[in-house]
Amino acid sequence: MKGRILLALVSVAIGALIAELLLAVLSPQVYRLPDVWTHDAQLGWSHRSGSEGHLVTPEFDVLYQIDDDGRRQHVSVSVGRRLQLYGDSFAEGWGVDVDVGLAARLESGLALSVHNYGTAGYGTDQELLLFAEQGAAEAPDIVLVLFYANDLWNNVSRRGIGTERGAKPFFRPGTDGGLRLMGTPIPAPAPRIKSQPAALAEHSHLWSLGRKAMAQESPVPAQQMRQFYGGLYGHDIEPYRPVWDLTESLLAEFARASQKAGAEFVVVYAPSIVQIEAENWRTKRDLHKLTQDYDLSQPNRQLQAIAKRQGIDFIDLTAAFKAAAGEQTLYFRDSHWNEAGHQLAAEATVSALVDFGYAEARSGVEMAE
């Protein structure tokens, strides 16, 4: 009897091992974040200098290495003129090797060095503070801010809405017409104690698949999703005017700070996957029960208008992405750019910066049309 039980247990263990190996090869399931972000009393969170780890999802497994200056930085070519890149996970290079991310691609196309300050989860507010805290003193020639749709909501939130979801600094309009910084210093959060099931979910494909199959759905409340998409793509923008006004004030202040430091200031709009892939938008409409009429070009027009009012140079990548989308896949399923997306974004940005007269193409680089 004991022998049969032992044989059964061994068979189950072997079957589980085979299933784990098959899932790892054919259908990965785990998600694991690298331990490279840390609490920051002024910014909410920042990169931990000298840290490293792997970002793992069912779509990719990439190494994150943070340099001594707290950046996910490629090996920069040392030339006189410098461009600083600010943004969230798109600028940081989520899901791709650092040498094929936007920052590295920009440097390979332009005759200058590129320093990447992109940090997952940041909005324009945290990027502005990072520039004031670190970037301005380094006397950049160009400050490039990558704006992604959810930055609109990051800018009004008191807590992170991305990878890091702790408290963050935020701005509100001041009585003098300027911006008033609030929420700092940010107290350190309580230490995170990872449960055994959570640890298993980060390393076992079979366990992760089982949890996914048994999990009860906890969708974001429908009203919250309607607000999120309404502010970005709704026809009636007036209820969200204060949100857009705050973003305008942040971009205007960022431009003033950059120009004071002697740098040209440029905003680049990174189109969301729903603006480029019609099927993805249909899926999200069904998932979140979005029944009203939407205009997916709304954020582009809002940012274009802000740029015109504030005298800010603006690059909209949407047309380039729409033109290329029929021939290649530009996004991971998690909505971030894949390697091809980073390459296309860099080509379009390089071309625009050369047209502005802010930089020269690196010798031997063919310009994108």
Image (cartoon, rainbow, N blue to C red):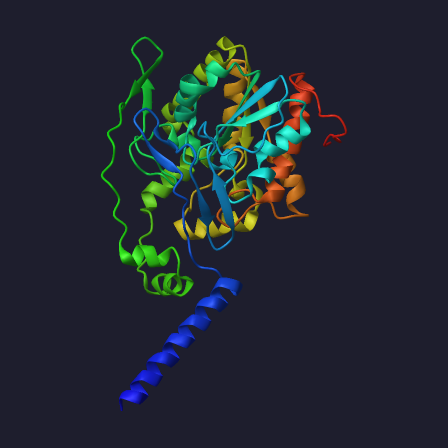
Does the rendering let one see residue 202?
A: yes
Tell whether 198 sits left or right of 271: left
Pinpoint residue 344: horizontal percent, then vertical percent. Answer: 64, 37
Q: Nearer the viewer, residue 140 or 68?
A: 68
Q: Quadrant of the N terminus?
A: bottom left
Whether residue 335 is visible: no
Q: Return the residue nearer the eye: 304 or 111.
A: 111
Residue 98 position, x and y percent, is 55, 39
Left or right: residue 8 compared with residue 94: left
Within the image, what quadrant is residue 185 found in? top left
> Would you place residue 33 above or below residue 209 in this image?
above
Q: Tell me the quarter of the picture where residue 76 sits.
A: top right
Q: Which residue lies at the image location 66% right of the left edge and 31% below the top edge?
A: 108
Q: How many marks?
A: 0
Which residue is painted at 26% across and 44% down in the image? 192
179 sits to left or right of 78: left
Query: Residue 351, position in %: x, y?
Result: 68, 27
Q: Point out residue 191 in the picture as x, y percentages from the top left corner.
A: 24, 41
- Residue at image point 34% right, 62% down: 211
Task: Answer above or below: position of 15 versus 222.
Answer: below
Above-or-below relation of 326 to 142: below
Q: Nearer the viewer, residue 283 or 355?
A: 355
53 or 332, nearer to the observer: 53
Q: Quadrant of residue 240?
A: top left
Above or below residue 273? Residue 153 is above
| On-image quarter of the C terminus | top right
